[in-house]
Image (cartoon, grey):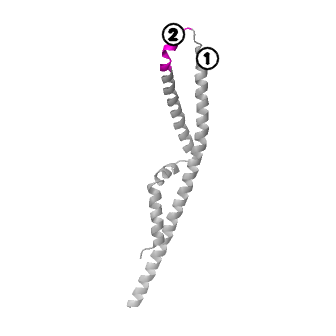
Amino acid sequence: MINTKKTRLMTQCAIYRKHEGVEDLKIAGFFKEDFIRLEMLKTILAITLGYLIILGMVIIYYSEFLIAHALNLNYKMFGKKILGYYLLILVIYIVIALSRYGIVYLRSHKRLSKYYKMLGRIKKISIEQEHERELEEENWEELQA
């Protein structure tokens, strides 16, 4: 006979596994600090690459001005401003990413622990069903004798 509770649990597990479970299982392969560190490196790389692209576009946009005033410009001041803006943007994004990925990790582990509890319940129900089936077989053999 079909156990509806077990069927519901198995369906919930399958839905979780199909949607959120894939990402959660990847995250579960890391310690919290390692996961956050990896995501921070990705964030730093993305910010640096994006900043360089935008800086290149600004330089191209103002290239006529830069060429016309090449001898009169204070390059040290421009370098400090460019570096200052980069560091400011980097610090802001690092703080945001640090808090975000900490939350992502914790939520992932909460969902994963619920998933493992559901698997435990499914296993418990299966053991109970197997035990009931064995009892029924013993009773059937006794009735036949």
User: Is 124 drawn above or below residue 143 in the view shown?
Assistant: above
Sequence-wise first label, 1 or 2:
2
Residue 130, above or below 145: above
- Magenta-colored stretch includes residue 145: no
Mainly helix, strand or loop, the magenta region? helix
Q: What crowding class fits label 1: few (fewer than 14 Cα within 10 Å), some (14-19), or many (20 or more)?
A: few
Vertical arrangement, residue 94 with respect to residue 72, above or below: below
Amino acid type, label 1: Met
Q: Position of residue 59 (x, y in %)?
A: 50, 20
The residue under the point 58% across, 23% down is: 82
Q: Residue at x 51, y 70 (%)?
A: 124
* Residue 126 in sight: no
Q: Quadrant of the C terminus?
A: bottom left
Residue 50 - label: none
Q: Horizontal placement of 122 versus 80: left or right?
A: left
Q: What secondary structure is marked by label 2?
A: helix
x%, y% of residue 127?
48, 72
Magenta residues (range): 59-71
The residues bearing labels 1 and 2 have C-alpha atoms spaced at a distance of: 18 Å
The one nearer the camera, 145 or 122, is 122
Q: What residue appears at the point 47 percent right and 77 percent down from the top-left corner?
A: 131
Where does the image place residue 108, in percent across and percent down from the top left? Answer: 54, 52
Q: Where does label 1 land, which residue?
A: 77
Q: Quadrant of the N terminus?
A: bottom left
The residue labelled by disc 2 is: 68
Q: Nearer the viewer, mark 1 or mark 2?
A: 2
SS for callout 1: helix
Amino acid bearing label 2 = Ala
x and y percentages locating residue 72 in the rendered image: 57, 9
